[in-house]
Amino acid sequence: MKVVGWVLVGLLAIAGVLTLDPAVVGLSELTPVLQAISMRGLLALGAGALGVLLLVIALLARKTAGKGRRLLVVGVLALLVGAGHVGVLIERGTSAGEPFGVAPDGAIDVLTVNTLGARGGVGELVTMVDALEPDVIALQETPAEDAERLAAGVGGEYQVFTATTGPQPVQATALLISVELGAYTQREAPATRFGGVWAAPVDGGGPDLLSVHPVPPVPGNVPTWRAELAAITGLCTRVPGVVLAGDFNATVDHAALRDSRCLDGSIDTGGHATWPAARSPLLGTPIDHVLMDPGAWEPMASRVLEAPGSSDHRAVLVRIVPVS
């Protein structure tokens, strides 16, 4: 029985270590691992609490030498795993970022917001856009009429592109591009259940831009989620200079993002959760991103902003510059 007990300890140790990077063994897109790895803050909290509990039990069971030692080892391992998750969050950055300075020549500011059907109206979003003056605005769960209202209400002038796959706001996606970037035309985006928008420069001078929103990986949707993410992130290989922005319903720990050619735009903000907005940014999940072709662009700065209106997502702003 002692051997079996230590074997179980070894298996628990391996499982704990694998939670730090499940994509290494191909588990990052399998239920329930894909859902768990989305919430590193909660994993850290849970592992830490488990470690403390097991250490207390081990001390109480110290008269039973074998059992007490095993519980002690598992408790220490749980604390180390929790510390590992905290370390990843710290390395990626838990700051919300600082206001950007003057943009250098060639820089493009990209804002992405899931507006939850523009709940609460577009007034707060207009205020946000006027304050930030982004060159590109990717909107998810935003009906076309609300995207048009936003464009009409802000001080800058934007070209508006929209797409929808049905009557519900969740099925509507929009993309606003400043006229200062030149004329754009809409192309057919990769087919996704919630719709996507792809705009390409008319003269070929600027980047191809997309607003995307793959389905969430809830039970029954996981195969579709995998397929949609693969189609979207594959554009970083197939379309030179492409920039993708949106609610990806995935983090950089999921293989579709982690192993793709796409470069995530977060700079010291990658551990700051964007959903749900009502929860602490350390206990949510960072699923809203600006991704780019690293052969053409690199991120210069990023911010995570509190949700406009009644959205359940925080907004993400990234400044990208051409690769020198």
Image: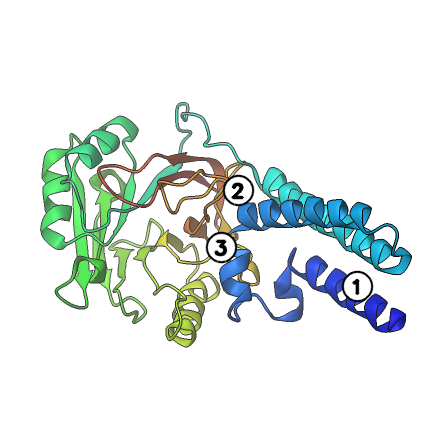
- The crowd level at tag 1 (other Cα within 10 Å; few <14, some 14-19, many 20+) is some
Residue highlighted by disc 3: 251
Please report whichever mark, 3 or 1, sits nearer to the chain's N-terminal start: 1
Please indicate, yes or no, whether residue 84 appears anywhere in the rendered image. no
- Residue depicted at 19% across the width and 61% down the height: 163
Q: Which secondary structure, mark 2?
A: loop
**Callout 3 secondary element:** loop
Q: Is residue 137 left or right of residue 101?
A: left
Amino acid type of the residue that numbered disc 3 sits on in the rendered structure? Thr
At horizontal 27% and vertical 62% (from top left) the residue drawn is 196
Q: Amino acid at mark 1?
A: Val
- Check disc 2 and give the amino acid type: Gly
Residue 50: x and y in percent read 66, 50
Across the whole image, how many numbered discs are drawn on residues? 3
Q: Which residue is mark 1?
A: 9
**Mark 1 touching mark 2, by CB under 8 A?**
no
User: In screen coordinates, is 56 left or right of 177?
Assistant: right
Residue at the disc numbered 2: 271
Q: Earlier in the sequence, mark 3 or mark 2?
A: 3
Looking at the image, which is closer to me, 156 or 277? 277
Distance between mark 3 and mark 2 Cα atoms: 10 Å
Q: Residues within 10 Å of mark 3 (few under 14, many from 20)?
A: many
Element marked by disc 1: helix
Give above or below for 151 relative to 73.
above
Q: At x 43% / y 52%, what residue is drawn?
A: 287
Relative image position of residue 99 (x, y in whole percent): 40, 25
